[in-house]
Amino acid sequence: MASSSPRRRAAAALPAYQLYGEPGLHSVGEKLHIETISSRSRLHDWEIRPHRHELLFQILYIRQGRAEAQVDGRSQRLSGPAAVTVPASTAHGFAFEPGIDGWVVTVQELHVRQLLAPEPGLWPLFEQPGVLDWGADAAQRALGEPAAVAGAVAALAAEFAAHQRWRHAAIDAELTRLLLALARAWPGPADSGSAGVPAHLARYRALVDARFRLQPSVASLAAELGISATQLNRICRAQLGKGALDLLHARLALEAQRQLAYTNLSVKRIGIDLGFADPGYFTRFFQRLCGLSPTAWRRRAHQG
């Protein structure tokens, strides 16, 4: 591969792109874009440095070849066939073997949510980054070869390139097919079905993602959902084993980790960006959730 791992190069802020190397925070012109892995990565010496997309969801499918993925500070070696799903705002980078064969699908995350809305249990499977490594993981190979995923990616790429009549409807159909194939490939229950995460919880998570920097109260977010804070806490504990405030705090801690790992912003500046006016309180908050002070966590992340 071009390098042993995507290099962490300190930046004033973690870069946010439409497509890698194309600055901007907004989505691509169409709802979806698909291209081969090599078409972009070969222009960057087969290395995609850590970055994120504020509004975009990505699926990387490796048909053949090797790569190392770095997702939110965690590294994993991949050997095709493999797939990686990357939700919006997730820090990610890749180092690819030259000549790797595969595809990158980029789509507006809101559109993915809308496509999966009829089945409440589906979108929660994609809210966090995911990896399926059939090439290296015997347990995942035992679940079956990724024929359904490979076929869906190929069909989506063909439909995207064809520009035939009713193209957008056909692309949506093939994208839904791909998402379902990925969902069925995840280890776990065969069918999460309509017994998945309640609508109130899904909406609460969306509100947290949109407003965590403002540190809103649980009561104010619950009111937007048309329920009480007590009801929201009951839903969160029943489904996730943790309270509503815990979810908000976990989102703040995740963003702090991203900024510590991928930027050279001071601890004080990161705290202010996340709504902490008192640097000491931010340090205590981070240490309580992450087990290390922000400075110690950054040092360990850079050593890794």
Image (cartoon, grey):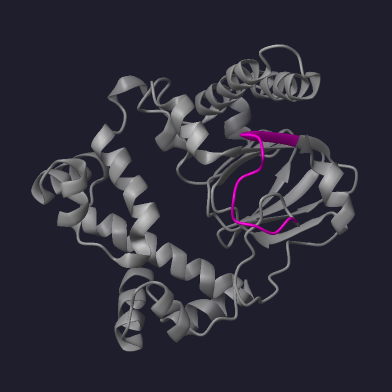
- Identified at 85% across, 57% down, the residue is 44
Q: Is residue 26 magenta?
A: yes
**In this picture, which residue range is highlighted in magenta?**
22-34
Q: Position of residue 212 (x, y in %)?
A: 35, 61
Task: Work out which quarter of the rendered image holds the N terminus and state it.
Answer: bottom right
Whether residue 255 sits left or right of residue 141 in the image: it is left
* Magenta segment, prevailing SS (helix, strand or loop): loop
Outermost residue toward the top?
A: 165
Horizontally, residue 63 falls left or right of residue 26, namely: right
Q: Which residue is pictured at 45% across the width and 42% down the height?
A: 127
Depth check, front residue: 65 or 161: 161
The quarter of the picture where the C terminus appears is bottom right
Dividing the picture into quarters, in which one does residue 199 lie? top left
Q: Is residue 104 left or right of residue 128?
A: right
The relative height of residue 9 versus residue 194 in the rendered view (above or below) is: below
- Give the answer, above or below, for where 102 lies relative to 76: above
Q: Nearer the viewer, residue 62 or 155?
A: 155
In reply to whether residue 292 is colored magenta, the answer given is no
Residue 298: x and y, percent?
A: 53, 78
Q: Indicate the position of residue 184 as horizontal and vertical percent values.
A: 51, 23
The relative height of residue 140 versus residue 236 in the rendered view (above or below) is above
